[in-house]
Amino acid sequence: MSAYRFRRAHRLLKTDEFSSVFSLRMSRSNATFQVSARPNELGHARLGLVVGRKVHKRAVRRNYIKRTVREWFRLNRQTLPDMDFVVRAKVPFTRAERTEVITALSSLFAKLARCRASSSS
């Protein structure tokens, strides 16, 4: 059960950590999200979230987006490569659209993992 916890060690917290991911410019995007990634030497994946006020003016909606992405990451962290990921939301979504959004998010992470695998070979 503890393998699925979302601990502080699995989060990007500092501005420098976010900046290092953005500076590498390894990213993929779709209509809902942009996911940037950078390899790390920690032995596990880490997640950072960016959901600005332009996405939705209500904090409740922005927090729902962040909760949804964190939950997906928490459940799929074991299958992700050792990378730092920053997920930037582009547009808001509702509970009715959640399954489509999760599928789109999964495909972006898979594309970045394939990109990492091809670049390290």
Image (cartoon, rainbow, N blue to C red):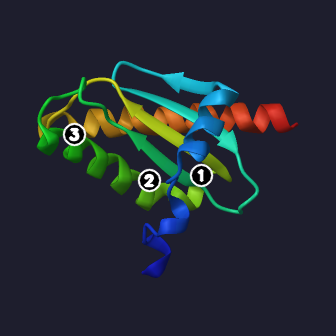
Label 3 and label 1: CA atoms lie apart by 25 Å
In the image, farthest residue toward the top: 31
Which x, y percent locates residue 24?
A: 69, 29
Label 2 and label 3: CA atoms lie apart by 17 Å
Q: Which residue is mark 3?
A: 62
Mark identifier at residue 73? 2
Q: Amino acid at mark 2?
A: Phe
State the quadrant of the N terminus: bottom left
Label 1 and label 2: CA atoms lie apart by 9 Å
First of labels 1, 2 by sequence position: 2
Which x, y percent locates residue 26?
A: 65, 27
Instruction: Please tell me which residue is depicted at 53% across the width and 38% down the height of the picture.
Output: 109
Q: Amino acid at mark 1?
A: Leu
First of labels 3, 1 by sequence position: 3
Q: Mark 2 touching mark 3, by CB under 8 A?
A: no
In the image, farthest residue toward the bottom: 1
Q: Which residue is mark 1?
A: 80
Q: Specify the quadrant of the image occupied by residue 93.
A: top left
From this view, report whether residue 17 is shown above or below residue 120: below
The label nearer to you, 2 versus 3, is 3
In the image, farthest residue toward the right: 121
Q: Pointer 3: residues within 10 angstroms few (<14), some, or many (20+)?
A: many
Q: Specify the quadrant of the image occupied by residue 119.
A: top right
Instruction: Please tell me which residue is depicted at 65% across the width and 24% down the height of the picture.
Output: 25
Which x, y percent locates residue 85?
A: 55, 43
The total of numbered circles placed on residues is 3
Q: Pointer 1: residues within 10 angstroms few (<14), some, or many (20+)?
A: some
Q: Mark 1 touching mark 2, by CB under 8 A?
A: yes
